[in-house]
Image (cartoon, rainbow, N blue to C red):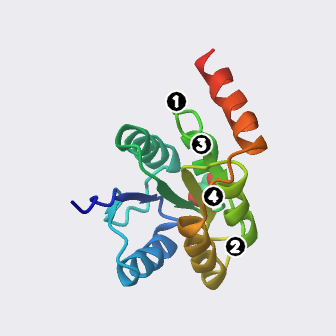
Amino acid sequence: MEEKKKKIILAADHAGFELKEKLKEVLNESEVPFDDLTPKFDKEDDYTDEAFKAARKVVKDKTQGILVCGTGIGMCIAANKVKGAMAAMAYDEKTARLSRQHNDANILCLGARTTEEGEAVKALKAWLTTRFLEGRHAIRVNKIKEFERG
Ligand code: RB5
């Protein structure tokens, strides 16, 4: 039986909304299923609420998430407060790829005001297709997980 692909969780605040819409197009073109938790633009929204909601769903569904705000930084800080979230701030294709290879990040944070659209698209594609390298990187990632467990 064919395994059903898990949906990627998407969320953005007002500053990240437009880039998030572009990333949705890319996911659609690549036939990657997703669940957009911020389907409507709201100029008053706060990145914190979007990040908490999305990170909780990523952890609950054991899937991956893409969060976009102005810099990506606020989303990343907030998402990492959720147990099980391993959110990585990426600025380009290289940092996105490394966040999968070395850190096993389950959430990619991008900044619409800091990364131009073409680079963000490259970062997204690299992130989705790059696997965790395990080995010595797993030892380090497990230390983070142990620390979180307390
Ligand atoms: C919103 O103006 C902006 O502060 C937010 O999108 C983000 O950049 C925070 O880190």
Q: Residue 97: x percent and y percent? A: 68, 65
Quarter occupied by the N terminus: bottom left
Q: Are marks 4 and 3 in contact (CB under 8 Å)?
A: no
**Direction from residue 72 to residue 139 in the image, left or right:** right
**Direction from residue 16 to residue 91 in the image, left or right:** right
Q: Residue 94: x percent and y percent? A: 75, 70
Q: Are marks 2 and 3 in contact (CB under 8 Å)?
A: no
Q: Secondary structure at mark 1?
A: loop
Q: Residue 29: x percent and y percent? A: 38, 84
Residue position marked by numbered label 4 in the rendering? 72
| C-alpha gap between disc 4 and disc 3 | 14 Å
Determine crowd level at label 1: few under 14, some 14-19, many 20+ residues with C-alpha closer than 10 A. Answer: few
**Direction from residue 150 to residue 13 in the image, left or right:** left
Image depth: mark 2 or mark 4 in front? 2
Determine crowd level at label 4: few under 14, some 14-19, many 20+ residues with C-alpha closer than 10 A. Answer: many
Q: Amino acid at mark 4?
A: Gly
Q: Are marks 1 and 4 in contact (CB under 8 Å)?
A: no
Within 8 Å: ligand 1 and the Cβ of disc 2? no
Determine crowd level at label 2: few under 14, some 14-19, many 20+ residues with C-alpha closer than 10 A. Answer: some
Residue position marked by numbered label 2 in the rendering? 93
